[in-house]
């Protein structure tokens, strides 16, 4: 092991508060959560009972399925919308691009309870747009319920799109005009260029963005809880109710669910890394 240089000591000392912060608020709680997931309901002894409950109870299996499905739907929809938006931003003048990106950065942080409240004010049962649509007789919105699966997906897509735009914008900006001109001179149409050149070039960024969106959606809690409460069975909502429920608490079972949630996110990241390596190998 390389000895520490005296000149590096001040730098390492300045990093010490950050290391302590990570240990106190990430490493230690994570270790405690994993250990609790292998304990019984009383918090004593070591057992796999909590994991047996997770995978043997239809209620918790439904929560897992709902979270995965809503994450896939919102991630795919958000990715498609953001791809079109990110490409459109590259065609705008420089000053307008900066303004739009600043707005995207601001809206990407507009999540949680404020986002749910905004949607309730606009599209709730007595929301502004709901009343306007009813007054105008727009039958296409009849039967729309913000507090259902459809409304939840709509809210999830909202906070997915700005984040995906910020991640995809540099990739689209990196596609050079010379590539397009060369393709057009060789007789390729615009769709053919994007199918054979543009999309394959930015495919690693697209796959990475999808993984981040999926993990972002799987871990969302405040928005879903503020919008539907416990009326829709989601994994994060179940974890929250087991940790700080009004009826009963079971932090050991919550730990098992949280471990599964973390494993799902890590699995998605691993698949993304495997896919990126394969894409880069095929491109070379």
Image (cartoon, rainbow, N blue to C red):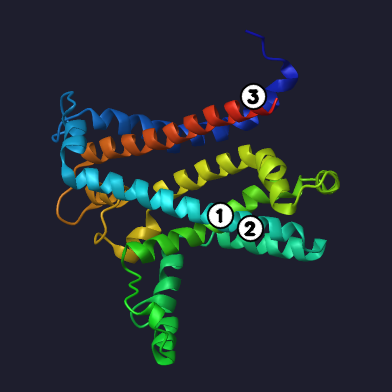
Q: State the CA–CA distance, disc 1 to disc 2.
A: 7 Å
User: Which residue occupies the extreme front position in the image?
Assistant: 187
Q: Earlier in the sequence, mark 3 or mark 2?
A: 2
Q: Nearer the viewer, residue 33 or 203?
A: 203
Label 3 to label 1: alpha-carbon separation: 25 Å
On screen, residue 18 above or below 246 = above
Question: Who's the residue at 74% across and 53% down the image?
Answer: 190
Measured as percent of width and height from the top left, residue 136 is found at: 44, 91
Residue 239 appears in the figure: no
Left or right: 177 with respect to 277?
Answer: right
Residue at 41% x, 49% y is: 71
Distance (Cα) linking label 3 and label 2: 27 Å
Q: Contact, CB < 8 Å: mark 3 with mark 2? A: no
At a point 57% along the width and 62% down the height, the residue shown is: 107
Residue 89 located left or right of residue 183: left
Helix, strand, or loop for circle 2? helix
Which residue is nearer to you in this view: 160 or 46? Answer: 160
Classify 169 as above or below 51: below
> Which label number is shown at residue 181?
none
The quadrant of the rendering that contains the N terminus is top right
Quickly name the residue at label 1: 80
- Seen from the viewer's position, the closer of residues 29 and 176 is 176
Residue occupied by mark 2: 84
- Image coordinates of residue 241 in percent, x first then y, are 24, 51
Residue at the far top in the pictured view: 1
| Location of mark 3 (residue) | 281
């Amino acid at each position: 092991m390389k000895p520490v240089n005296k000149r590096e000591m001040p730098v390492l000392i300045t990093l010490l508060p950050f290391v302590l912060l990570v240990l106190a608020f990430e490493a230690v709680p994570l270790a405690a959560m994993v250990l609790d997931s292998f304990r019984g309901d009383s918090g004593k002894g070591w057992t796999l009972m909590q994991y047996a409950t997770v995978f043997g109870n239809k209620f918790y299996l439904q929560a897992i399925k709902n979270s995965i499905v809503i994450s896939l739907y919102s991630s795919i929809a958000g990715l498609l919308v953001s791809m079109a938006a990110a490409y459109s931003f590259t065609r705008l003048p420089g000053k307008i691009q900066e303004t739009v990106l600043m707005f995207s950065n601001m809206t990407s942080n507009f999540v949680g309870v404020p986002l749910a409240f905004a949607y309730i004010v606009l599209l709730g049962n007595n929301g502004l747009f709901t009343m306007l649509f009813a007054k105008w007789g727009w039958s296409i919105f009849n039967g729309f319920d913000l507090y259902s699966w459809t409304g939840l997906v709509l809210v999830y897509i909202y906070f997915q799109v700005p984040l995906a735009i910020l991640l995809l914008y540099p990739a689209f900006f990196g596609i050079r005009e010379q590539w397009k001109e060369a393709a057009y001179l060789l007789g390729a149409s615009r769709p053919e260029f994007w199918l054979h050149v543009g999309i394959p070039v930015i495919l690693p960024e697209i796959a990475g963005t999808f993984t981040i969106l999926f993990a972002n959606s799987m871990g969302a809690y405040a928005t879903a809880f503020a919008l539907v409460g416990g009326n829709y069975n989601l994994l994060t909502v179940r974890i929250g109710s087991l940790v700080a429920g009004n009826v009963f608490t079971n932090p050991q079972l919550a730990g098992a669910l949280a471990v599964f949630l973390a494993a799902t996110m890590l699995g998605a990241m691993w698949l993304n890394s495997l896919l990126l390596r394969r894409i880069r190998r095929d491109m070379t």
